[in-house]
Image: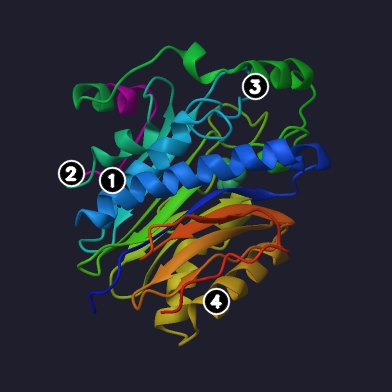
Amino acid sequence: MTAGDPLLAVHGGAGRLPRRALSRKNRAAYEEGLASALKAGWRTLRRGGSALKAVTEAVAVLEDHQLFNAGRGAALCADGTAELSASLMNGKSREVGAMVGLRRARNPIRAAGTLIGHAHGLLFGEEADRYAAQHGIEQVPQDYFRTEHRWAQWQKRRGTGKITLDHDEENAHGTVGAVARDRRGNLAAATSTGGLVNQLPGRVGDTPVVGAGTWADNGVCAVSATGKGDAFARVAFARRVADLIELGGLSAQEAAESALEEVKNVGGEGGCILIDRNGMCVLPFNSAHMLRGWIGRDGRPHVAIGPDQDVELPAS
Ligand code: ASP
Protein backbone atom coordinates (compact mmCIF):
# COMPACT_ATOMS: atom_id res chain seq x y z
CA MET A 1 0.00 0.00 0.00
CA THR A 2 1.45 3.32 -0.98
CA ALA A 3 0.72 6.34 1.11
CA GLY A 4 -0.13 9.53 -0.70
CA ASP A 5 -2.47 12.44 -0.81
CA PRO A 6 -5.71 11.91 1.06
CA LEU A 7 -8.86 11.83 -1.03
CA LEU A 8 -12.60 11.65 -0.36
CA ALA A 9 -15.63 11.16 -2.63
CA VAL A 10 -19.34 11.27 -1.78
CA HIS A 11 -22.62 10.49 -3.52
CA GLY A 12 -26.15 11.65 -2.83
CA GLY A 13 -28.06 9.02 -4.81
CA ALA A 14 -28.62 8.06 -8.45
CA GLY A 15 -31.68 7.90 -10.70
CA ARG A 16 -33.56 10.17 -13.06
CA LEU A 17 -34.10 13.55 -11.47
CA PRO A 18 -37.25 15.19 -12.77
CA ARG A 19 -36.97 18.61 -14.38
CA ARG A 20 -38.38 20.36 -11.30
CA ALA A 21 -35.72 18.85 -9.09
CA LEU A 22 -33.12 20.34 -11.42
CA SER A 23 -34.11 23.97 -11.03
CA ARG A 24 -31.23 26.33 -10.31
CA LYS A 25 -32.36 26.64 -6.70
CA ASN A 26 -32.59 22.88 -6.15
CA ARG A 27 -29.28 22.21 -7.85
CA ALA A 28 -27.64 24.76 -5.59
CA ALA A 29 -29.16 23.08 -2.53
CA TYR A 30 -27.92 19.61 -3.61
CA GLU A 31 -24.49 21.00 -4.38
CA GLU A 32 -24.32 22.78 -1.06
CA GLY A 33 -25.23 19.53 0.74
CA LEU A 34 -22.57 17.54 -1.10
CA ALA A 35 -19.96 20.25 -0.55
CA SER A 36 -20.59 20.42 3.20
CA ALA A 37 -20.26 16.63 3.46
CA LEU A 38 -16.98 16.77 1.51
CA LYS A 39 -15.66 19.53 3.75
CA ALA A 40 -16.61 17.62 6.92
CA GLY A 41 -14.77 14.50 5.75
CA TRP A 42 -11.86 16.58 4.53
CA ARG A 43 -11.42 18.22 7.96
CA THR A 44 -10.73 14.73 9.33
CA LEU A 45 -8.34 13.72 6.54
CA ARG A 46 -6.43 17.01 6.58
CA ARG A 47 -5.66 16.60 10.26
CA GLY A 48 -4.31 13.11 9.65
CA GLY A 49 -7.53 11.34 10.73
CA SER A 50 -8.50 7.93 9.43
CA ALA A 51 -10.41 7.14 6.25
CA LEU A 52 -13.02 5.38 8.41
CA LYS A 53 -13.65 8.52 10.46
CA ALA A 54 -13.72 10.69 7.33
CA VAL A 55 -16.43 8.62 5.62
CA THR A 56 -18.45 8.55 8.85
CA GLU A 57 -18.31 12.34 9.23
CA ALA A 58 -19.20 12.95 5.57
CA VAL A 59 -22.17 10.57 5.63
CA ALA A 60 -23.42 11.95 8.97
CA VAL A 61 -23.66 15.43 7.39
CA LEU A 62 -25.80 14.05 4.56
CA GLU A 63 -27.96 12.13 7.05
CA ASP A 64 -28.64 15.36 8.96
CA HIS A 65 -29.48 17.18 5.71
CA GLN A 66 -33.15 16.69 4.94
CA LEU A 67 -32.60 16.87 1.20
CA PHE A 68 -31.11 13.37 1.15
CA ASN A 69 -32.67 9.93 1.59
CA ALA A 70 -30.85 8.98 4.79
CA GLY A 71 -31.38 9.94 8.43
CA ARG A 72 -33.66 13.01 8.58
CA GLY A 73 -35.76 13.19 5.41
CA ALA A 74 -35.41 9.47 4.61
CA ALA A 75 -37.95 7.77 2.32
CA LEU A 76 -40.90 6.24 4.19
CA CYS A 77 -42.08 2.64 4.05
CA ALA A 78 -45.60 1.65 2.95
CA ASP A 79 -46.80 1.92 6.58
CA GLY A 80 -45.53 5.51 6.89
CA THR A 81 -42.56 4.68 9.11
CA ALA A 82 -38.89 5.42 8.49
CA GLU A 83 -36.62 2.37 8.55
CA LEU A 84 -32.99 3.31 8.25
CA SER A 85 -30.06 1.17 7.23
CA ALA A 86 -26.34 1.81 6.94
CA SER A 87 -23.02 0.03 6.64
CA LEU A 88 -19.36 0.88 6.69
CA MET A 89 -16.13 -1.00 6.17
CA ASN A 90 -12.56 -0.39 7.22
CA GLY A 91 -10.23 -1.35 4.36
CA LYS A 92 -7.27 -1.71 6.70
CA SER A 93 -8.76 -4.43 8.91
CA ARG A 94 -11.72 -5.54 6.75
CA GLU A 95 -13.86 -4.93 9.87
CA VAL A 96 -17.47 -4.01 9.14
CA GLY A 97 -20.43 -2.45 10.90
CA ALA A 98 -23.96 -2.63 9.52
CA MET A 99 -27.40 -1.92 10.92
CA VAL A 100 -30.76 -2.61 9.33
CA GLY A 101 -34.23 -1.26 10.11
CA LEU A 102 -33.22 1.38 12.66
CA ARG A 103 -36.09 3.55 13.86
CA ARG A 104 -34.51 5.70 16.53
CA ALA A 105 -30.80 6.27 15.90
CA ARG A 106 -30.35 9.82 14.63
CA ASN A 107 -27.27 8.92 12.60
CA PRO A 108 -27.46 5.35 11.29
CA ILE A 109 -23.85 5.52 10.08
CA ARG A 110 -22.63 6.29 13.59
CA ALA A 111 -24.81 3.46 14.88
CA ALA A 112 -23.25 1.04 12.35
CA GLY A 113 -19.82 2.31 13.40
CA THR A 114 -20.35 1.06 16.96
CA LEU A 115 -20.00 -2.50 15.60
CA ILE A 116 -16.52 -1.94 14.16
CA GLY A 117 -14.26 -4.16 16.22
CA HIS A 118 -17.15 -6.24 17.58
CA ALA A 119 -17.49 -9.96 16.80
CA HIS A 120 -20.87 -9.25 15.11
CA GLY A 121 -20.93 -7.23 11.91
CA LEU A 122 -24.66 -6.69 11.40
CA LEU A 123 -27.62 -6.10 13.73
CA PHE A 124 -31.25 -5.47 12.82
CA GLY A 125 -34.37 -3.84 14.22
CA GLU A 126 -35.08 -2.96 17.83
CA GLU A 127 -31.97 -4.68 19.12
CA ALA A 128 -29.84 -2.66 16.74
CA ASP A 129 -31.37 0.57 18.04
CA ARG A 130 -30.87 -0.63 21.61
CA TYR A 131 -27.24 -1.55 20.99
CA ALA A 132 -26.60 1.83 19.37
CA ALA A 133 -28.24 3.65 22.32
CA GLN A 134 -26.11 1.69 24.79
CA HIS A 135 -23.06 2.82 22.85
CA GLY A 136 -23.89 6.49 23.07
CA ILE A 137 -25.70 7.04 19.75
CA GLU A 138 -28.30 9.80 19.99
CA GLN A 139 -31.90 8.53 19.84
CA VAL A 140 -34.72 10.59 18.33
CA PRO A 141 -38.49 10.06 17.91
CA GLN A 142 -39.81 8.86 14.51
CA ASP A 143 -41.15 12.37 13.85
CA TYR A 144 -37.59 13.59 13.54
CA PHE A 145 -37.11 11.58 10.32
CA ARG A 146 -40.56 12.28 8.83
CA THR A 147 -40.21 15.63 7.13
CA GLU A 148 -43.16 17.52 5.65
CA HIS A 149 -42.13 16.43 2.15
CA ARG A 150 -41.98 12.77 3.14
CA TRP A 151 -45.32 12.90 4.88
CA ALA A 152 -47.01 14.44 1.82
CA GLN A 153 -45.33 11.84 -0.41
CA TRP A 154 -46.59 9.03 1.82
CA GLN A 155 -50.16 10.40 1.87
CA LYS A 156 -50.09 10.32 -1.94
CA ARG A 157 -48.60 6.85 -2.11
CA ARG A 158 -50.34 4.99 0.71
CA GLY A 159 -52.21 1.93 -0.46
CA THR A 160 -51.03 2.25 -4.09
CA GLY A 161 -48.31 -0.40 -3.83
CA LYS A 162 -46.11 1.71 -6.14
CA ILE A 163 -42.45 1.45 -5.09
CA THR A 164 -39.82 3.81 -6.56
CA LEU A 165 -36.23 4.84 -6.38
CA ASP A 166 -36.17 8.16 -4.59
CA HIS A 167 -34.42 9.96 -7.44
CA ASP A 168 -37.22 9.02 -9.82
CA GLU A 169 -39.63 10.96 -7.63
CA GLU A 170 -41.18 14.34 -8.36
CA ASN A 171 -39.13 15.96 -5.63
CA ALA A 172 -36.09 13.76 -5.54
CA HIS A 173 -33.72 13.08 -2.69
CA GLY A 174 -31.09 10.33 -2.57
CA THR A 175 -29.28 7.63 -0.66
CA VAL A 176 -25.84 8.75 0.48
CA GLY A 177 -22.34 7.32 0.63
CA ALA A 178 -18.65 8.14 0.95
CA VAL A 179 -15.29 6.55 0.17
CA ALA A 180 -11.91 7.81 1.38
CA ARG A 181 -8.20 7.23 1.35
CA ASP A 182 -6.25 8.67 4.25
CA ARG A 183 -2.65 9.86 4.58
CA ARG A 184 -1.47 6.37 5.49
CA GLY A 185 -3.10 4.92 2.38
CA ASN A 186 -5.94 3.27 4.30
CA LEU A 187 -9.30 3.00 2.52
CA ALA A 188 -12.87 3.03 3.89
CA ALA A 189 -16.42 3.09 2.55
CA ALA A 190 -19.80 4.01 4.09
CA THR A 191 -23.39 4.04 2.77
CA SER A 192 -26.70 5.05 4.42
CA THR A 193 -30.33 5.03 3.24
CA GLY A 194 -34.03 5.12 4.00
CA GLY A 195 -34.50 2.63 1.14
CA LEU A 196 -37.05 2.90 -1.65
CA VAL A 197 -40.13 5.11 -1.52
CA ASN A 198 -43.11 3.03 -0.30
CA GLN A 199 -41.03 -0.12 0.18
CA LEU A 200 -42.48 -2.92 2.29
CA PRO A 201 -41.58 -2.52 5.96
CA GLY A 202 -38.76 -4.99 6.60
CA ARG A 203 -37.37 -4.76 3.05
CA VAL A 204 -33.56 -4.82 2.96
CA GLY A 205 -31.77 -3.43 -0.11
CA ASP A 206 -28.08 -3.32 -0.96
CA THR A 207 -26.98 -0.45 1.30
CA PRO A 208 -26.48 -2.32 4.60
CA VAL A 209 -25.25 -5.48 2.86
CA VAL A 210 -21.47 -5.49 2.87
CA GLY A 211 -20.29 -6.66 -0.55
CA ALA A 212 -23.42 -5.33 -2.26
CA GLY A 213 -23.68 -1.59 -1.41
CA THR A 214 -20.38 -1.13 0.43
CA TRP A 215 -16.88 -2.61 0.25
CA ALA A 216 -13.38 -1.58 1.29
CA ASP A 217 -10.10 -3.44 1.15
CA ASN A 218 -6.77 -1.60 1.34
CA GLY A 219 -5.27 -3.96 -1.23
CA VAL A 220 -7.91 -3.18 -3.87
CA CYS A 221 -10.44 -0.36 -3.48
CA ALA A 222 -13.29 1.26 -1.53
CA VAL A 223 -16.78 1.35 -3.11
CA SER A 224 -20.16 2.83 -2.15
CA ALA A 225 -23.13 2.17 -4.45
CA THR A 226 -26.52 3.75 -5.07
CA GLY A 227 -29.45 2.80 -7.27
CA LYS A 228 -32.04 0.03 -7.50
CA GLY A 229 -30.71 -1.91 -4.56
CA ASP A 230 -32.34 -5.25 -5.24
CA ALA A 231 -30.45 -5.43 -8.55
CA PHE A 232 -27.17 -4.32 -6.92
CA ALA A 233 -27.60 -7.06 -4.30
CA ARG A 234 -28.23 -9.67 -7.01
CA VAL A 235 -24.82 -9.02 -8.56
CA ALA A 236 -23.04 -8.55 -5.17
CA PHE A 237 -22.04 -5.26 -6.73
CA ALA A 238 -19.34 -3.70 -4.54
CA ARG A 239 -17.40 -6.93 -4.08
CA ARG A 240 -17.86 -7.69 -7.78
CA VAL A 241 -16.15 -4.41 -8.65
CA ALA A 242 -13.26 -5.26 -6.31
CA ASP A 243 -12.91 -8.75 -7.83
CA LEU A 244 -12.89 -7.38 -11.36
CA ILE A 245 -9.97 -5.14 -10.36
CA GLU A 246 -8.10 -7.67 -8.24
CA LEU A 247 -8.68 -10.90 -10.15
CA GLY A 248 -9.75 -9.60 -13.54
CA GLY A 249 -7.02 -6.98 -13.88
CA LEU A 250 -9.50 -4.26 -14.92
CA SER A 251 -8.96 -0.58 -14.15
CA ALA A 252 -11.24 1.06 -11.57
CA GLN A 253 -13.34 2.66 -14.31
CA GLU A 254 -13.61 -0.54 -16.37
CA ALA A 255 -14.51 -2.65 -13.33
CA ALA A 256 -17.23 -0.27 -12.14
CA GLU A 257 -18.70 0.07 -15.63
CA SER A 258 -18.69 -3.67 -16.16
CA ALA A 259 -20.43 -4.33 -12.81
CA LEU A 260 -22.98 -1.58 -13.60
CA GLU A 261 -23.69 -3.36 -16.88
CA GLU A 262 -24.44 -6.51 -14.89
CA VAL A 263 -26.82 -4.48 -12.71
CA LYS A 264 -28.53 -3.29 -15.88
CA ASN A 265 -28.83 -6.86 -17.13
CA VAL A 266 -30.88 -7.77 -14.06
CA GLY A 267 -33.14 -4.76 -14.46
CA GLY A 268 -31.39 -2.14 -12.32
CA GLU A 269 -29.51 1.11 -12.73
CA GLY A 270 -27.52 3.50 -10.60
CA GLY A 271 -23.88 4.26 -9.93
CA CYS A 272 -21.03 4.17 -7.46
CA ILE A 273 -18.08 6.09 -6.12
CA LEU A 274 -14.73 4.33 -5.94
CA ILE A 275 -11.17 5.03 -4.82
CA ASP A 276 -8.60 2.38 -5.61
CA ARG A 277 -5.43 1.56 -3.74
CA ASN A 278 -3.40 3.86 -5.98
CA GLY A 279 -5.65 6.81 -5.25
CA MET A 280 -7.54 6.64 -8.55
CA CYS A 281 -11.05 8.01 -8.00
CA VAL A 282 -13.97 7.26 -10.36
CA LEU A 283 -17.66 8.18 -10.10
CA PRO A 284 -19.48 6.22 -12.85
CA PHE A 285 -23.26 5.78 -13.25
CA ASN A 286 -25.67 4.38 -15.83
CA SER A 287 -28.75 6.21 -14.59
CA ALA A 288 -29.61 9.67 -15.90
CA HIS A 289 -28.09 11.44 -12.88
CA MET A 290 -25.96 10.86 -9.85
CA LEU A 291 -25.26 13.45 -7.20
CA ARG A 292 -21.53 13.16 -6.64
CA GLY A 293 -18.35 14.93 -5.72
CA TRP A 294 -14.80 14.61 -4.50
CA ILE A 295 -12.24 16.59 -2.55
CA GLY A 296 -8.46 16.26 -2.58
CA ARG A 297 -5.21 18.09 -2.15
CA ASP A 298 -6.52 21.62 -2.75
CA GLY A 299 -9.33 21.21 -0.19
CA ARG A 300 -11.90 22.42 -2.73
CA PRO A 301 -15.13 20.42 -3.22
CA HIS A 302 -15.85 19.38 -6.84
CA VAL A 303 -19.52 18.42 -7.28
CA ALA A 304 -21.81 17.42 -10.15
CA ILE A 305 -25.28 16.03 -10.81
CA GLY A 306 -25.73 15.29 -14.52
CA PRO A 307 -23.65 13.41 -17.10
CA ASP A 308 -22.83 16.66 -18.84
CA GLN A 309 -20.87 18.01 -15.89
CA ASP A 310 -17.16 17.48 -15.62
CA VAL A 311 -15.92 16.96 -12.08
CA GLU A 312 -12.25 17.10 -13.13
CA LEU A 313 -11.29 13.79 -11.60
CA PRO A 314 -7.98 13.73 -9.82
CA ALA A 315 -5.19 11.82 -11.54
CA SER A 316 -3.75 8.93 -9.53
N1 ASP B 1 -29.85 1.46 -3.06
C1 ASP B 1 -30.91 1.96 -2.23
C2 ASP B 1 -31.90 0.86 -1.93
O1 ASP B 1 -32.24 0.12 -2.84
C3 ASP B 1 -31.67 3.09 -2.85
C4 ASP B 1 -30.82 4.23 -3.40
O2 ASP B 1 -29.64 4.06 -3.68
O3 ASP B 1 -31.36 5.34 -3.53
O4 ASP B 1 -32.37 0.77 -0.82
Q: Is residue 43 magenta?
A: no
Q: Is mark 1 within 8 Å of ligand 1?
A: no
How much space separates mark 3 and mark 2, taking CA atoms? 34 Å
Which residue lies under the disc numbered 1? Answer: 121
Which residue lies under the disc numbered 2? Answer: 118
At horizontal 27% and vertical 55% (from top left) the residue drawn is: 45
The residue range painted magenta reads 120-130
Q: Is residue 4 above or below residue 115?
A: below
How much space separates mark 2 and mark 4, taking CA atoms? 33 Å
Q: Earlier in the sequence, mark 1 or mark 4?
A: 1
- Residue 289 percent across, percent down from the top left: 70, 54
- Residue 253's disc is 4
* Element at label 3: helix
Structural crowding at the residue carrying mark 4, measured as other residues with C-alpha within 10 Å and reported as few (<14), some (14–19) or many (≥20) = some
Q: Amino acid at mark 4?
A: Gln
Which residue lies under the disc numbered 3? Answer: 150
Left or right: residue 285 compared with residue 62: right
